[in-house]
Structure formats: C-alpha cells, structure tokens
Amino acid sequence: MPNPDIIAQAMYAKDSYSQWLGINILETKKGYCRAEMTVREEMTNGFKIAHGGITYSLADSALAFASNAEGRLAVSIETSISHTQAVHIADVITAEATVMNSSPKLAIYDVKITNQNNEVVALFKGTVYRKSDDWDTIIKNDINL
Amino acid sequence: MPNPDIIAQAMYAKDSYSQWLGINILETKKGYCRAEMTVREEMTNGFKIAHGGITYSLADSALAFASNAEGRLAVSIETSISHTQAVHIADVITAEATVMNSSPKLAIYDVKITNQNNEVVALFKGTVYRKSDDWDTIIKNDINL
Amino acid sequence: MPNPDIIAQAMYAKDSYSQWLGINILETKKGYCRAEMTVREEMTNGFKIAHGGITYSLADSALAFASNAEGRLAVSIETSISHTQAVHIADVITAEATVMNSSPKLAIYDVKITNQNNEVVALFKGTVYRKSDDWDTIIKNDINL
Amino acid sequence: MPNPDIIAQAMYAKDSYSQWLGINILETKKGYCRAEMTVREEMTNGFKIAHGGITYSLADSALAFASNAEGRLAVSIETSISHTQAVHIADVITAEATVMNSSPKLAIYDVKITNQNNEVVALFKGTVYRKSDDWDTIIKNDINL
C-alpha cells in the first residue's frame, strides 16, 4: 500500500473544502491523523464564535485522512460531536484522530479537538465502512472516485 | 417572546458562516425550522462530493434556528449525523429540524436532510441546553452574546 | 423471505434476556417493530427508577426484530439513546422502531420509547449492518448463529 | 464531599439491577470508575451471545458511579455505544469510565468495555448533567432521590 502521507496528500489535493478551511495536515500514520487550521471571521456564527460546522469539518477531514491512510477506501457511516468550549477568531484548532477499534469492514475513531492553549473544544467519534477499493490502484490510475 | 422568524433573522444577520453557505431560511416556528442551500464546487471534498461538514453545517444551523426560536438562548450539547447518500455540486439540500422532546433545560431535535429529489442524504440528531437569557432582551438591547 | 412475524418469533424463542425482560412483541413488519414490557423492582437503579440499561435493552430488542424482519441477518453497529423522563416500577413502556433509511448493506432506525401515558421516556437511534445470511435459510436449517 | 467509594457504594446498595447483573465495582475515583461482571446464560439474545443491553447496562452503571463520584448528583443526558465484538457466556467484561471533559453543569465520559483477554467489546460515550444536590447531604439524610 502507498505511504499514509501520500494517500492523505492525494485526497487533500482534490479537496476544495479542506483547502478553503485552510487545513494543514501535520502528521498521518495508519489509523492516525493530526491536522490544524486557523479560524477566520467568515467561519463564525451569530454569536461571533466558530460555527459548530467548522469544528465538525476539521474533525471529519482528520477522520477521512486517518481512516483512508490504512490503505483502503473508507467512508463515514455515523459521526457524533460534542462542542465543549467556544472557539474564537484567530484560534488555532488541532484535531487528532486515533483508531479505537478496527475490523476488516468497520473501524471506529476518536477525534479530540483542542485549541492553541491545549484546551479541549470538542470531542468527536466516527465510524467508517471500508470499501474494497485500495488506494494503490486509485492513485496509480488517477481514478476519480 | 419575539416572533420565531425575528429570532432566526436576528441570528442569521450576524452569522457569517451560514451566509457563506448561502443558507435560505424557508420557515421557522417554535421548535421547528426548514432551511435550504445549494452546494458549490468549493464545498466538495477529494471525491468531488459535498464534504460531510457541509451537510452537518446546514443541519446545525437549522437546529440553532429551531431551538432558539422557542424564545430562550439555546446551545448545542451533543449532535450526531449519519450521511446516507452522496451530495453533488448544484444539489439543493433542505434541512428540516423538528423538536422531539422538550424540558425547561434540555431539548432534543431530529433534523432530516433531503436533496431536490426528496431523497434522504443525512439524518441528524441534536441535544441543546437552554440558558436563562431570553431573545426578547437580547434583541431589544442588541446584546452581543 | 419468511413472514416478518416468523423471523421475530424465531429470534425471541431463543432470546433469554428479552424473555427475562418480559418483552411482548406487539407488531412486526418489514423495517418496523413495536414491543412493550412492564418495569419490575429488580430493574431499578439506586434512585428506584428503571436503570438506563432497561430502556436501552427494550429499544435494542425492537431494533433487532425490526431490522432482521427485512429478511437478512442484521447486526447493530452503533446506537445512541437519550433518556428524557424517569420510568417507574409498574410502568408499561413501548418501543416503536421505524426504518429511516435503508441501503443494501446499512440501515438506520429511530426507536421511540413511550410510557402508558404516551409520554416519551427515551429516544434511540440505531445503525445496522446487513450480513449475507438470509432468515429463510437460517430458520429452515435451524442454524445456530 | 464524601469519598468517591462511599458514594458509589451508597448508590450500589440500592441498585437492584446492577446487583442482578452481578456488577463488582473495582475502583472509583473522582471522574473515574472501573467495574466488572460475568455474563450468564439469562443475559444472552437469540444468537446466544450477550444482548447489547447487557454491555450497555454495565457501561451505564460505570458512568453513573464515575460521574456521581465527583460529589454532585449527575444524570445521563445522552449516551452512545458501538458493539465491536461478540460477548459470550462466562466472559468477564470490564467497563472503565474516564471523564474526558468537565464543566460545572455538564461532563462527558468515555467508557471502554473489554473482555478477559483485554479485547475491546464495546465503546461507549456518555454526557451527564450535574444537578445541584450534593452527595454529602444525600447520604447524611438518607434521602430517597
């Protein structure tokens, strides 16, 4: 299988929304990803704090990179998130996705999202389903999924 | 209490991210909101379908409008979403948030997200905590929350 | 495929725990089940109300009957429950499981649990994975799964 | 506040269902509890493996002991569980509840459930709401909650 970094970069290169968010992938390993972004004014809600969808989006991208980095195409089945602390403009938030359980078809990840002061701002849990497509083939043939 | 529409519009007027998404609030009642948006290329992920964070964001905004429309400030505690079908560029997706259970401090909402063909693309469930602040006072005094 | 009632009864006949709970299956259709039980003193926690595990168990059984009644073996992947009101000794609680979304491999169910006064005591959501085993074969061959 | 062990034991002493399950509290600290039980035949479903409600019940009890051990009455708002591996008769399953985030009114716990071979059989997440009642007063006055 390709290097986990190569898979994550191949995904990111075509991922317009993660690019709009300004996501920076810090580290990718099999079943693991750490990614960060900086909150901008256009990402805030009516209370001038980050919209819940922003934190969710960062976590969901980290989940996608971590789970696909295991070598096979993985799609999210069910995700949940608890927002524990407000996130403000200019905050740098980091999502760390870690595999908690893995079987041939299903895997569960915890994603912890912290701010620049290392405070937990959200806790995310995601379940993915592994398809049969492998990333080796996808990348070699530049397949559009 | 203010009219549910007035609360939702007051929230939306300051909600930069919901405006970026292009959310259009179709209807707001106590404990209910229906809102739609059109998916753009910049909202897609590496598979050129809408990023999971986009559908979540629409649902989370609908939850915010529906729960605050009951008259008191409501904040999300825990949310979950299942993505059931891919969403493509130019798809018009609609989120319909309905209160399922309500107590003085907590309320639970189901949000169903469908596309222009009335197919379910995601199912969302959210729990909110009601603070003591009421929207009458917030709007009259133009309080920045 | 066998009649949904036959599948649910085949499952219930070997289900020691659902029998201990005293679950009574009221109705089974494809993707639907309604079942009830009466709370006994031995099912209560330290606050002398039904333990959260009791309401969950009834909902989980209803999910199992509803999802397997579609004809293929279904196993639960992820479930969530919100307990919205206390359940007391002698309360009759009813779980109504309804399919919300269905694909060849996955399906999502909502289960609403109410008491004898038709008050919502819990809201449950469950995702199942459909295996290839079909209930026709399982029942005809009396397979022990 | 009373010793966390004293709170957990006070709860357990009146908790008929946890006693029926045969739960053995191994350790309780503020925001933490580890508890085990052995699966009996009467706890199995139609597939002769532990009913999902059994694993949930153990996790939910561990959550209750861990969260109340912080000194104030805590009630569950929302819980989710993923069953990752079958549990069989005579298996000894252990639930370890750990606080992940805590605020004056809300707290989130992860509960990991493993079998005697230290394999993960389920992953549970729970959110509790802290009431104003403190366990010091509850125990001193033998209040029936």
Image (cartoon, coloured by chain):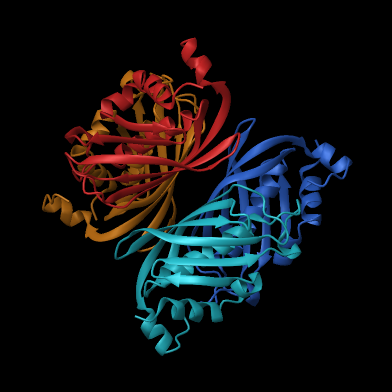
Chain colours: A red, B orange, C blue, D cyan
Q: Is residue B132 left or right of residue D45?
A: left
Q: Is residue B114 visible?
A: yes
Q: Residue at x 51, y 29 (%)?
A: A74
How far across and down, in percent of the image, does residue D36 sit?
59, 66
With respect to residue A132, does C49 lie above or below? below
How far across and down, in percent of the image, does residue C108 sit?
57, 41
Q: Residue at x 51, y 69 (%)?
A: C86
State which quadrant residue D106 falls in.
Answer: bottom left
> Looking at the image, which residue sits at the far bottom?
D141
> Looking at the image, which residue sits at the far right?
C141
Q: In the depicted view, which residue is nearer to us: A137 or B12?
A: A137
How far across and down, in percent of the image, does residue B47 sit?
43, 20
> Looking at the image, which residue sits at the far left?
B141
How far across and down, in percent of the image, does residue C115 sit?
58, 64
Q: Is residue B92 left or right of residue D83?
A: left
Q: Is residue B69 visible?
A: no
Q: Residue at x 37, y 85 (%)?
A: D137
With respect to residue A10, does A93 lie above or below? below
Q: Is residue D69 left or right of residue B74?
A: right
Count of marks placed on residues: 0
